[in-house]
């Protein structure tokens, strides 16, 4: 919904309350960002809209934020004056405040401004950058490694950014706790600024952070230290650590070094997903036996580690590919051995756990191959194909009991590059919200998992948006779905809503109206 020009007014309709709301006096405002305010149980509690109003004298720009409550009553309208040439990168709501991240390349800084739920501006935070920081950030952007804000429920926001030729994570508290930053020491022997400009090789050691999971109070990532770094195309990995941090303090509760060299029958893990539950931290991935299999990328199976919030491993379970249920999983797919599962959530049930995932694989596409030829190898010829949903049922000890397949339409997205693995591309797609999985609403011993994708015609033109919800109730699965036709004049997105509902946001370019409506999930 980015960069929509509202020429007259916004009209918002909410079917639940059978009322309309007109936001007055916003002629010629440009909508830069909008989102949902939610309460503790993730029910919709209000909405915010952030506009660019006008460029002013003295190289200033005026912005406006408008906040509505859940009944569409306007509760706040505030003005903000910022520097011109500042680009809004992102806006997020963490439960305490609405935060907006700006980048100003000419003046070389990042700035985070915030507003509370009543529209009161809070103290801003500024990160000074150097010329080489700006250049390095641009290089990373071309590698799909972007500056990003990540909301942490009722805690604050994480800022992923680049400085001193390395990657950093900064935590900005919104509940009066201390802010913190990860250290990224770097050896810049022989480094010259013009080498970055020319994209030439320079000698350095730097850290990268691949996010594997984000919870209400914790984050998990792989910390990768590399040397001889050539902007992602040529690098030598020095070390990999799997880490879990407590976000409001930066305290490290778990750290494990991943071996880069293993012996003939030695086992090594590759962490791919981390899901934070009330019962503990569930870390999932693949395990390899022997150095030859590790080099070939041929895993022996998947593992599930249960880690306590005190940082202790409570249980470890390996499930090898020879397991009968995994043979069944592979038989349902035409490309045996090429399929992967990305787990989005793990739900605790009376009998054990259910892991909710989507199948994906790396595919070569005709248009991608042509693009690679046209761009002389810069573009990627491969893409990531996301297809069916799978529900893995485990008992209390994480013994695999059953696998439930839910058939759905496939989606195709660009991966990181042809040189990256399917797993690395999947982590990137998850981080930026490109999987079809939307959310899971859990209540008691039942839950609703919703998947959203765009349907295409034979000419690959979008025709409709399809919403499929999988309902788990009384140890049984059922499905509910609906489709909304698309046309060029209406843009749509789906937003979280109260339990058992979806919130559909629509903007009609012809009538210049925006509407919100609740869609009830048919769970009977």
Image (cartoon, helix red, strand yellow):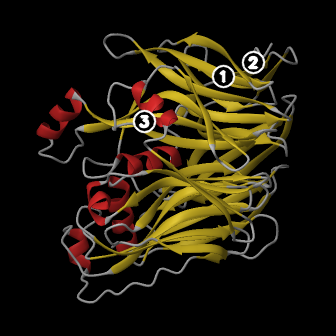
Q: Are marks 1 and 2 in contact (CB under 8 Å)?
A: yes
Place of residue 14 in the rendered image (x, y in percent of width and height, measured from the top left): 80, 20
- Decide: marks 3, 2 in contact (CB < 8 A)? no
Q: Are marks 3 and 1 in contact (CB under 8 Å)?
A: no
Q: In the visual, does 334 lie left or right of 48?
A: left
Q: Quick one: 163 or 79, which is closer to the camera?
A: 163
Q: Tell me the SS state at disc 3.
A: strand
Residue marked by disc 3: 360
Q: Earlier in the sequence, mark 3 or mark 1?
A: 3
Question: In the rendering, at what x and y percent does residue 348 appear?
Answer: 76, 43
Q: Residue at x 24, y 42 (%)?
A: 380
**Residue 521 badge:** 2
Q: Is residue 481 above or below residue 297?
A: above
Could you tell me which residue is drawn at 24 percent across and 61 percent down? Answer: 233
Check disc 2 and report its element: helix, strand or loop: loop
Crowding at mark 3 (Cα within 10 Å: few <14, some 14-19, many 20+): many
Disc 1 element: strand
Q: Nearer the viewer, residue 238 or 324?
A: 324
482 relative position to 197: left or right: right
How far apart are the two marked residues, 3 and 1, measured between alpha carbons? 19 Å
Above/below status of 426 relative to 113? above
| Mark with earlier residue (1, 2) | 1
Q: Which residue is mark 1?
A: 469
Say which of 430 and 491 sits in front.
430
């Amino acid at each position: 919904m980015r960069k929509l020009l509202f020429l007259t007014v916004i009209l918002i309709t909410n079917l639940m309350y059978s009322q309309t709301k007109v936001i007055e006096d916003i002629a010629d405002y440009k909508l830069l960002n909008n989102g949902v305010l939610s309460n503790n149980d993730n029910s919709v509690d209000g909405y915010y809209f952030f506009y660019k109003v006008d460029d002013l004298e003295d190289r200033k720009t005026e912005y406006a934020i408008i906040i509505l409550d859940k009944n569409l009553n306007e509760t706040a309208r505030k003005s903000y004056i910022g520097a011109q040439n500042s680009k809004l990168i992102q806006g997020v709501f963490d439960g305490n405040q609405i935060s907006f991240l700006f980048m100003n390349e000419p003046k070389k800084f990042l700035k985070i401004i915030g507003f509370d739920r009543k529209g009161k501006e809070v103290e801003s935070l500024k990160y000074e950058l150097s010329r080489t920081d700006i250049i390095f950030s641009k290089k990373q952007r071309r590698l799909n490694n972007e500056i990003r804000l990540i909301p942490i429920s009722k805690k604050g926001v994480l800022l992923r950014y680049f400085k001193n030729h390395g990657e950093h994570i900064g935590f900005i508290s919104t509940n009066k706790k201390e802010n913190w930053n990860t250290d990224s020491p770097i050896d810049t022997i022989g480094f010259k600024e013009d080498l970055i400009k020319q994209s030439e090789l320079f000698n350095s050691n730097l850290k990268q952070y691949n996010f594997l999971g984000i919870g209400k109070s914790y984050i998990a990532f792989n910390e990768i230290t590399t040397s001889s770094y050539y902007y992602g195309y040529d690098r030598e990995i020095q070390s990999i650590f799997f880490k879990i941090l407590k976000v409001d303090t930066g305290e490290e509760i778990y750290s494990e070094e991943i071996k880069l060299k293993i012996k003939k029958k030695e086992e090594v893990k590759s962490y791919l997903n981390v899901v934070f539950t009330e019962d503990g931290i569930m870390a999932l991935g693949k395990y390899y036996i022997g150095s030859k299999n590790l080099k070939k990328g041929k895993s022996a199976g998947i593992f599930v580690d249960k880690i306590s919030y005190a940082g202790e491993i409570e249980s470890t379970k390996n499930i090898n590919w020879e397991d009968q249920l995994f043979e069944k999983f592979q038989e349902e797919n035409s490309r045996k051995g090429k399929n992967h599962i990305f787990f989005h959530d793990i739900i605790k049930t009376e009998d054990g756990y259910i892991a909710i995932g989507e199948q994906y694989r790396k595919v070569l596409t005709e248009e991608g191959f042509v693009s690679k030829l046209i761009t002389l190898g810069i573009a990627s010829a491969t893409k990531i194909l996301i297809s069916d949903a799978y529900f893995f049922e485990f008992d209390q000890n994480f013994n695999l009991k059953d696998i439930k397949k839910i058939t759905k339409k496939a989606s195709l997205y660009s991966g990181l590059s042809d040189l990256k693995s399917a797993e690395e591309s999947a982590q990137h797609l998850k981080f930026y919200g490109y999987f079809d999985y939307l959310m899971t609403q859990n209540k008691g011993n039942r839950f609703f998992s919703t998947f959203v994708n765009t349907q295409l015609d034979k000419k690959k033109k979008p025709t409709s948006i399809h919403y499929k919800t999988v309902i788990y109730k009384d140890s049984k699965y059922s499905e509910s779905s609906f489709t909304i036709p698309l046309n060029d004049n209406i843009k749509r997105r789906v937003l979280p809503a109260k339990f058992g509902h979806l919130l559909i946001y629509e903007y009609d370019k012809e009538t210049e109206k925006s509407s919100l409506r609740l869609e009830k999930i048919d769970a009977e």
